[in-house]
């Protein structure tokens, strides 16, 4: 059982770090509060949908910004969606970048948009890796017969 306690401590420390570094915010805690025995995979499911959605939107954004004539309304609509879904899981750093991204859309600034897209992609892949690590730790704890500390 000792290993479980170790893993639980690791999970608590890792989660605290993600909040401290601004990867996650209060919204993530709210998601966790919606998870219970009847829906034990709620957070993983919601976050997986966020990953699918974000992969698609980032793809669309890349395509939209490569056009000879950029449709900034379309770009802005994609960024708005990404901002909404990142805020709904508490991916705070992605959300904040989307706000800057939308300003460049308003200014019809292709270069600014491309720079922001790169930053958003970087932040997104960071938060994706960190959340996948978090979920892996949770699975290890459960596999070892422990419970997830709240």
Image: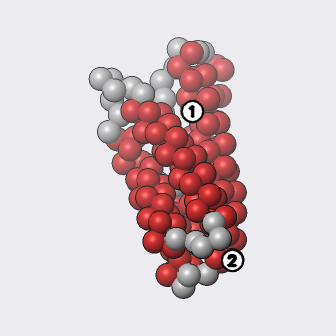
Relative to 78, is 135 on the left or the right?
Answer: right
Given residues 17 and 109, the one toward you in this image is 109
Identify which residue is drawn at 61% across, 30% down.
137
Q: Residues within 10 Å of mark 1 (few under 14, many from 20)?
A: some
Indicate the quadrant containing the N terminus: top left, top right, bottom left or bottom right: top right
Q: Callout 2: few (<14), some (14-19), or many (20+) C-alpha neighbours within 10 Å?
A: few
- The answer to whether one can see residue 84 in this image is yes
Q: In terms of image quadrants, where is residue 7?
A: top right
The residue located at (62%, 45%) in the rendering is 128
- Left or right of residue 137, residue 82 in this image: left
Picture quarter with the C terminus: top left
Q: Where is residue 22 in the image (x, y as percent from the top left)?
A: 58, 60
Residue 17 visible (yes or no): no
| Residue that badge 2 annotates | 111
Front tag of 2 and 1: 2
Judged from the image, the secondary structure of the residue bearing numbered disc 1 is helix
- The residue sitting at 57% across, 33% down in the picture is 135
Q: Which of 76 and 139 is in front in this view?
A: 76
Where residue 24 appears, as percent x and y from the top left, is 53, 54
- Of the image marks 2 and 1, the number of the one nearer the N terminus: 2
From the top left corner, tell me how far across and down residue 19 is, in percent. 56, 55
Query: According to the image, label 1 marks what residue?
Result: 135
């Amino acid at each position: 059982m000792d290993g479980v306690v170790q893993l639980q401590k690791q999970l608590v420390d890792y989660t605290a770090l993600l909040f401290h570094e601004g990867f996650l915010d209060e919204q993530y805690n709210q998601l966790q509060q919606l998870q219970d025995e009847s829906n034990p995979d709620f957070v993983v499911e919601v976050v997986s949908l966020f990953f699918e959605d974000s992969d698609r939107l980032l793809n669309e954004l890349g395509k939209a910004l490569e056009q000879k004539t950029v449709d900034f309304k379309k770009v802005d609509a994609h960024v708005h969606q990404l901002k909404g879904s990142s805020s709904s899981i508490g991916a705070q750093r992605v959300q904040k970048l989307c706000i800057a991204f939308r300003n460049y859309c308003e200014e019809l600034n292709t270069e600014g948009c491309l720079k922001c897209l790169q930053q958003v992609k970087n932040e997104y892949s960071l938060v994706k890796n960190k959340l996948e690590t978090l979920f892996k730790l949770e699975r290890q704890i459960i596999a070892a017969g422990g419970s997830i500390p709240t």
